[in-house]
Image (cartoon, helix red, strand yellow):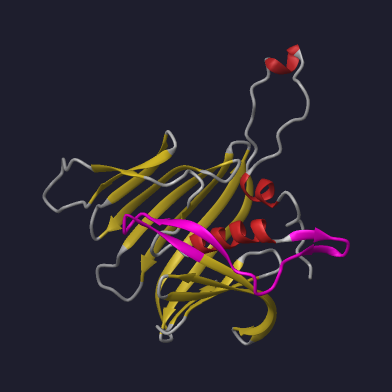
Amino acid sequence: MNFVRLASSWLCLLFAAVWARGSPTDAQKNIPLVASVRTLDSGSFGVWVNGERIASESFLIEQNTLGSTITSEVKTHGVRDGAGQKSTLQLASDGNLRRYDWVELSPGTGRASIVPNAEFLTEQFSAGTPGKKDEKPTEQPILLPHSVVVLDDYFFIHRELAAWRYLAATCHHEDQGVQCPVNQPAQLLALNPHLHESQALTLEYLGRETVSLRGTPRELNKLALRCESEVWTLWLDDQFKLVRVVVLGDGTEVLRD
């Protein structure tokens, strides 16, 4: 099984940049640190319900010396006054949450932000009530650790990040390469900012499967993501990029464009 570069430093690959080794010289101390940026993933997903495309999500995952930033924007199709929203998720070099921002673009103007506060988190949110231009945001503490996984509604790229976190925790080195155990579920703690609640996710690697995508057979890595009463099936390619999602029982399918 070719899990290239997943290895022992998976989180470093995904969430961190490479810090310079050794102590800087006096000359080096006077040189400003430039945070070089690398793109880990970018593109768009199409969201289909019962065979009809209803929404698109464009996304970008970038990494620098401070950590990583994940931006995403969702827009609906086939609606006269289409709905839209965007999010920005900032992670530290160890994968912990630095900040999360959500903004409703249309039809409303709601927004929410989550930031670390001491050992836990704080959320500020406003519903964007029409006619209330100076609406004061509501603030509430969230008694969750900085390591919580953000899994907001509507942003499927967050499912890819959850899969990466799971693979980092469960895969390991062997003589023939990096291997991931099949049918060994693990739990992650996730936060849904829209619902202002946390939940336990169960992820499980199900092995390799050949599926037909737009008429072309492809061998992909298959995972199951379970949360409360929902079951999501995820398929990732050999670069561990999410290419397909199926929500069991409700006719929803997500495909990478």
* Magenta span of residues: 172-201
Determine whether, in the image, residue 39 is placed left or right of residue 56: right
| Residue displayed at 59% across by 56% down | 165
Q: Name the magenta segment's main secondary structure.
A: strand
In the rendered view of the protein, which quadrant contains the N terminus?
Answer: bottom right
Nearer-the-camera pick, 43 or 40: 40
| Residue displayed at 51% across by 51% down | 70
From this viewpoint, which residue is outermost toward the top?
Answer: 26
Q: Position of residue 48 (x, y in %)?
A: 43, 79
From this viewpoint, which residue is outermost toward the left?
Answer: 131
In the rendered view of the protein, which quadrant contains the C terminus?
Answer: bottom right
Determine whether, in the image, residue 139 is placed left or right of residue 241: left
Seen in the picture, residue 157 relative to 214 is either above or below; the reply is above
Nearer-the-camera pick, 151 or 38: 151
| Residue displayed at 60% across by 70% down | 204
The answer to which image quadrant residue 93 occupies is top right
Determine whether, in the image, residue 200 is placed left or right of residue 183: left
Seen in the picture, residue 136 relative to 107 is either above or below; the reply is above
| Residue displayed at 25% across by 68% down | 81
Q: Position of residue 138 (x, y in %)?
A: 23, 43
Seen in the picture, residue 213 relative to 123 is either above or below; the reply is below
Q: Position of residue 16 (x, y in %)?
A: 64, 42
Q: Is residue 178 magenta?
A: yes
Determine whether, in the image, residue 34 is placed left or right of residue 202: right
Q: Position of residue 29 (x, y in %)?
A: 69, 16
